[in-house]
Amino acid sequence: METTDTAAVPQATRTEKPWAVVLLLMVGWMIAFIDRTSMSAAMADKTFIGTFSLSHVERGWLGSAVFWSYAVMQVPLGWVVDRYGVKWPYTICFALWCVATAATAWAESLTGLVVVRLLIGATEAIVLPASYRYIANHFDENRKGSATAVYSMGGKLGPAVGAALAAALIVQYSWKSMFILTGLIGLLWLLPWLTMVSNDFPSKAALAATKRQAGRVPMRNLLVSPVVWSGFIMTFCFSYFLFYAATWMPAYLVEQRHLSMMHSGIYTSVSFVLSAAVALAAGTAADYFIARGHDPVSVRKKFIVVGAFGGMTILFGAYAESQTAALFWNVASLAMVGLATTNNLALSKMTLIPKPAIGLNTGLLTIATSLAGGISASLSGWLLHVGGSYTLPMMSVCVFLLMAVLSALLLMKRKWAPRINDLN
């Protein structure tokens, strides 16, 4: 079945360099993650906890707030980028979330913190639909894995840089200074973005053509496709692990493994950096096999299954008696899941998805990311409260990774890709 459509797809201008833009998109996602997960470092700071008198459960609510609005805005903003382009919707949302991050410093209550986190989540919802729309428009199948791998490094390096940076700023200055600096410095990203990316806001004629093409893959076609549901499940499961690590890993290392704030930030950073490196290698390796004639679906599914089982080794760390062994499995499990993450993104968001619906499908799947973030933060907080240690939260990670394996094997099949309607 045909799963792509080249009509009404904007192409890069002669002055635009797609690989350079992918690198810029990677940095944009990294900044989004820094602003989204900087709260994790704050929630490990005794001064911050004392200022707002936060319980374990309230920390879970606060950690999850950003993901609920992020989920709600995915489909609307996916619809926007499918019709109105990438550049200007991304520009507006980027500026808003950076300002909201800085404004966190002036929150005076738990309610105020939740409100500003909801605003950050709503505006950051543009990131993935816009980014995958750009990659789908400018890269062939045998380069999508590499482009996705480069781009997805932002999702790993963001927590890595954010954990170390936020911890250092809190130790050196205060949690308030941390939010102000991370928010306002991020605005510098807009300078290269505005100069490097071509204006893809459509003319009236182009908008009409784009709407016709997008209408060939209506929401119903996505919702009845097992491929889309498989992508939803896998995206949720892998995101659950990543957001558990981003949200609770610093606190786990401080509270259960007795590391200092600074050392917890370093170990969290190392874990995400290694995961990013493995994800880049896995995406490039998958593209290598695809370019030599192997089936893209089969290749990417194999990487997904191996990576999911590698991530389950986090449970070894939960039962490790020595600090050294616990830290090793903490780092190794997150690194090994990188084998799966890039190939899941390429497979579920582009390989089997018609081009006219890339933004809308990405919005749907990013709802899974958002739900995973919210559920991971709050469920882990509740499991920590119930169990008194981080063993139960780590067990929940393994359960979801097993679900990802079953979803890939049973549902992700070419014959079940979303259908493209004929033009009237």
Image (cartoon, grey):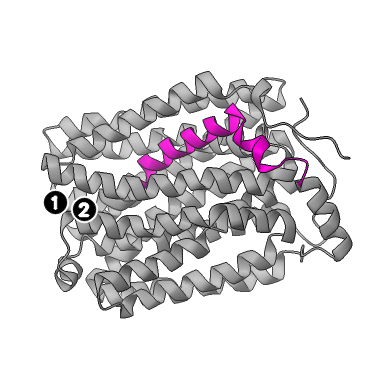
Residue at screen point 29% across, 54% down: 266
Q: Which residue is mark 1?
A: 255
Q: Is residue 15 visible?
A: yes
Q: Chief secondary structure of the magenta span?
A: helix
How far apart marks 1 and 2 lie (CA) works out to 6 Å
Quarter of the figure with the N terminus = top right
Q: Position of residue 252 (x, y in %)?
A: 20, 48
Mark 2: few, some, or many residues within 10 Å (few <14, many ≥20)?
A: many
Q: Is residue 273 above or below residue 405?
A: below
Label 1 close to label 2 by CB (< 8 Å):
yes
Residue at screen point 69% across, 52% down: 134
Q: Amino acid at mark 1?
A: Glu
> Of residues 219 and 252, which is closer to you in this image?
219
Magenta highlight range: 215-243
> Is residue 340 left or right of 2 when viewed as pictured?
left
Q: Which residue is mark 2?
A: 251
Residue at screen point 30% across, 29% down: 313
Q: Position of residue 421 (x, y in %)?
A: 79, 35
Examine the image and state in which quarter residue 140 appears.
top right
> Of residues 146 and 318, which is closer to you in this image?
318
Q: Is residue 20 visible?
A: no
Q: Amino acid at mark 2?
A: Ala
